[in-house]
Amino acid sequence: MVSFQELHEADFAGVTETAEAWANMAKALDGLDGRVGRDLTNTPQRAGWQGGAADDAGRTLQTIDTDFTQAAGVARALAAIIKDAAEDFTAARRDLDTALHDAAEQKLTVAADGAVSWPPMSSEGRNDPDYQEVQRKYQEDMKGKAETISNRLTKAVEKAAAADQRASTALQGDVGTSTTSFNSRPYGGGDAADAKRATDLMSKGGSLSDEERKRLQDLMAANSGSKEFSTTLLNGLKAGDKTGPDALLVYAKVYGDLSHGDRNAKDYQDIYGNLSQVLATATKDGGMGKEWEDNLLKAARKPGGSAAGFNDNYPALTELMGAKGTYDKGFLEKVGNDLVDYEHNSKRKGEDLWGPLYSGVMDKQGDPMGGLMRAMSRNPEASKEFLDPAANKNLDYLLKERKWPNQGYEDKQFDSIARNTSRGAFGDALEAAATGRDPHGNQPPRPHDAAMSRIMNETVATLGGDKAGAENSLPAGLRRPLGNMIADYAPDVHEILGKEIRGGSEPSGLTFSREQLLRTIRGAAEDPEAFRVIHTAESQEIARRMDTYGPQDFKPDATGRVNPKFAGFTQEAGQALGALDGVRGDVLIDHREDQKFKNNWQSKIDYHIYGTPVNYFLPAPFGDIAQRLVDVGTADYANKANAELDTKAQGDLSKNYSAGEEQLKAMIEYKAAVSGLSQKDIDTTGGVTQQLMEDVTQNYSTAIDRTYNGALGRG
């Protein structure tokens, strides 16, 4: 393992000199090739030495020529390996030095262990009113620069460590293990040579020795991102009489099984994951060629070797794809469209088509859609194009028509199980498609384009249905992704819940109804974490909009009334929070006898206050006042919501639930205070603040009852 300090201080001249020394050794050994036969064997033969001893001596001397030839080959191979390592080390050092130079230019300090820090901001101007805001922005800016430099330093060190690992593995392989003879097949340096080493080792499968398994791990880890290595490996695979794509599927099954086995499973998981990355690297930009890809899909469609005739080849392919690799859009769409076509048009369905592992929920699963969706979720652009209703019918098939494993009682699955099923993986791909973000990563929010909005619209309209009755049966694996998707569209959701709109919502143009949205939220809310992110995003959206109003908006007009625009916003916010509390009330009533469920809800509501903020797409900057509005409002919400956990009343929810109402009132009161109103002004009967709070009560009560009795059909 290479450390930051080692890379920073190392002198690689010695590595280059070693490579040159081995190259010279190879030349010297080449000069000896054949000399034993010419100079030593021929002389006694010409002198007439004959008999058994002469024959034995001749054979022994001839093997020395072979040794010289093989020794020269090994020396050339070692020279090439060490030369490659020297070039890789030098490139890594160059990256490190460039990053260090840039760090100094940005007034960042890099410690001996690679830790990056920055100086405190000057105290000049500390008495200025905006000093704290300037200091906050300085810290935020310097932290971002430090993280960028730190990432560059880490990548440089990782590059050197990978080169070291690659060279170590290659040197061990080419020297060989024999103590009495030279390696007759040294591969030398370069990615293609490493691929041949890996191919030889892979062919041994579960019979790899500990040393061989470690060498294969190292080769795959160091080279899986190399195009030359990946294409050479895939083209060189052989399994019995199978080659090419057919051999790949054999190895996918072999190493997939080993990665779930009882012995050295972690090592095999590493190998299997990097085989997935090899396939991703090789197929990027059509790197394996159309014919190879077409043959891969033909091989995937073939029934497996079982007597029942089910297909275990497609599951082997997509499970491999889902394991780790980041695949490009073209390859994902090609496999995805072919799988949907094959499954949709097959007479067999479910376990009859895919075998008994199709319905598995633990460890190995046999639904090929699961692996495909996991791979899709890591490429949001591919997910979007694959699921765009304007481009194909894939989303319609997956939402409405497909028979998923364990369909009908998925809503009873534990969260920890449901999130790892194929339907859960579909949820992740759906989230990636609708939001433009990998749900496993931490990418910044991004605006929604037309295709993303179409996917969101179709999903909610389908799952929300035309009438109440099925909202509680939303598959458990879809709950969290749906919560994240709805939260990501917070500006649109606020409009749909808060206003009567006849056209599309702003800014994404969503056209599903309020009732369809609320029924979808109700299904997702069986998972309190899903409800938490939806409520947090709505709270942020209300705070962002409220922050656009200033002190002048808390002054009445000539008739003593509130600014109509401000009043309208408050009414919409009351409607939105009332609608969400209608959902919350329905959930708690349905689970009123389940103490474990209620405890889980309480822990998530508390997390709402003390946990990490949820940041979704906001169409304008989110300032400190807006964040404080969220904090104030959600603190009141959590306290009241926890107190309402034991409410068992049904029917008129507005008489029993008021957490959202108290939240919004607290936000209005805080906004009034920071706008310059005294507590006396805030409490004045008929004043602007009190008028706004009266509007909140009326609209919140209307929305909570309308949601429960209308959208959810409990009336």
Image (cartoon, rainbow, N blue to C red):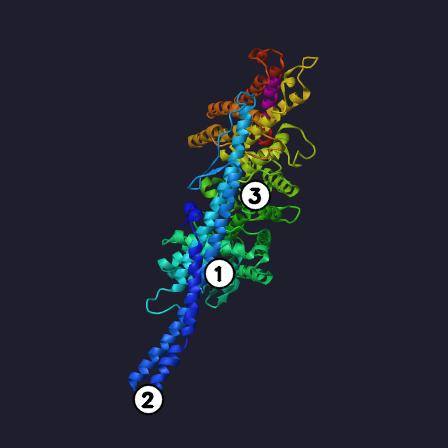
Q: Nearer the viewer, residue 186 or 678?
A: 186
- What numbered label is drawn on residue 190? 1
Is label 1 in a helix, a strand or a loop?
loop
- What numbered label is drawn on residue 48? 2
Q: Can you say whether 274 is above or below 582 in the image?
A: below
The answer to whether residue 271 is seen in the rendering is no
Which residue lies at the image location 54% right of the left edge and 48% below the top edge?
Answer: 373
Mark 3 vs mark 1: give the one in front.
1
Is label 2 in a helix, a strand or a loop?
loop
Is label 3 in a helix, a strand or a loop?
helix
Figure quadrant of residue 184: bottom left
Q: Judge whether residue 76 is colored magenta.
A: no
Query: Mark 3: few, some, or many residues within 10 Å (few <14, many ≥20)?
Result: many
Q: Can you say whether 475 is above or below 236 in the image?
A: above
The answer to whether residue 212 is seen in the rendering is yes
Total of numbered circles in the picture?
3
Q: Are marks 1 and 2 in contact (CB under 8 Å)?
A: no
